[in-house]
Image (cartoon, helix red, strand yellow):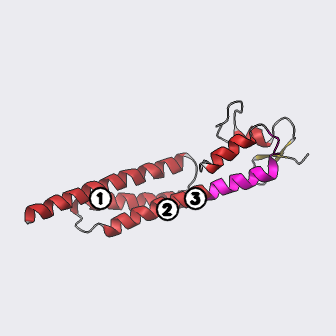
Amino acid sequence: MEKIRAESLKDWQKRLDSEIRQTQLDLENAVAQGLLTEEPRTRHAGVIETLTAMAPEMTEFAEAFHELAEVRQSIACERQRRVDECRERMRREVPESHPFRTRIEELLERGTSVSPAQGPLPGLESVAQLFSAGDAAGVEDPEGEPSASPP
């Protein structure tokens, strides 16, 4: 009976280690994409570090899995918020006839936010060009990002 319990604990610890690694990767990707400010990044990293340190001695795992799920949910919510912001900005500033509009809509439907620093579209060095591209004069918006003037 003790052997079965030890094997079960080992299995749960492996699952937890895997979830910790995946959550750490999600956090690193979110930081690399500029989704998180310093405060949530530090908070999420603290949760991950604490669970990493405690994992080898854990015998109860539900709370740890719950905390990791909260970190991942927080990241997913911020990603969705950014996608929604990009979608709204595109609707306001990019004419429906613009050649890259369809491609941007496809990226947004997949949950990919498009920032001025990114260049996910062939022919554009950055998405900032889209908001100030050839047919409209570039104007600085309050966040300092170029945007297109209405025609």
**Mark 1 secondary-structure assignment:** helix
Numbered circles on residues, count: 3
Above or below: residue 12 compared with residue 107: below
Q: Is tag 2's residue or tag 1's residue first in the polypeptide sequence? A: 1
Label 3 crowd bin: few (<14), some (14–19), many (20+), radius 10 Å: some
- Say if residue 24 shows up in the picture: yes
Tell me if residue 20 is in the magenta stretch: no
Label 1 crowd bin: few (<14), some (14–19), many (20+), radius 10 Å: few
Q: Which mark is residue 36?
A: none
Q: Quadrant of the C terminus?
A: top right
The magenta span reads: 81-98
Q: Amino acid at mark 2?
A: Gln
In the rendered view, does 75 fall on the left or right side of 98?
left
Rounded to the nearest whole Å, what is the CA distance between mark 2 and mark 1? 22 Å
Q: Amino acid at mark 1?
A: Ala
Q: Nearer the viewer, mark 1 or mark 3?
A: 3
- Where residue 48 appears, as percent x and y from the top left, is 38, 58
In the rendered view, does 38 fall on the left or right side of 13?
right
Label 2 crowd bin: few (<14), some (14–19), many (20+), radius 10 Å: few
Rounded to the nearest whole Å, what is the CA distance between mark 3 and mark 2? 9 Å
Above or below: residue 51 compared with residue 112: below
Dividing the picture into quadrants, the one containing residue 50 is bottom left
Q: Amino acid at mark 3?
A: Glu
- Where residue 82 appears, as percent x and y from the top left, is 64, 55
Q: Which mark is residue 73?
A: 2
Residue on which disc 3 sits: 78
Q: In the current view of this chain or complex, which residue is farthest to the top?
A: 123
Rounded to the nearest whole Å, what is the CA distance between mark 1 and mark 3? 27 Å
Q: Is tag 1's residue or tag 3's residue first in the polypeptide sequence? A: 1
Residue on which disc 1 sits: 53
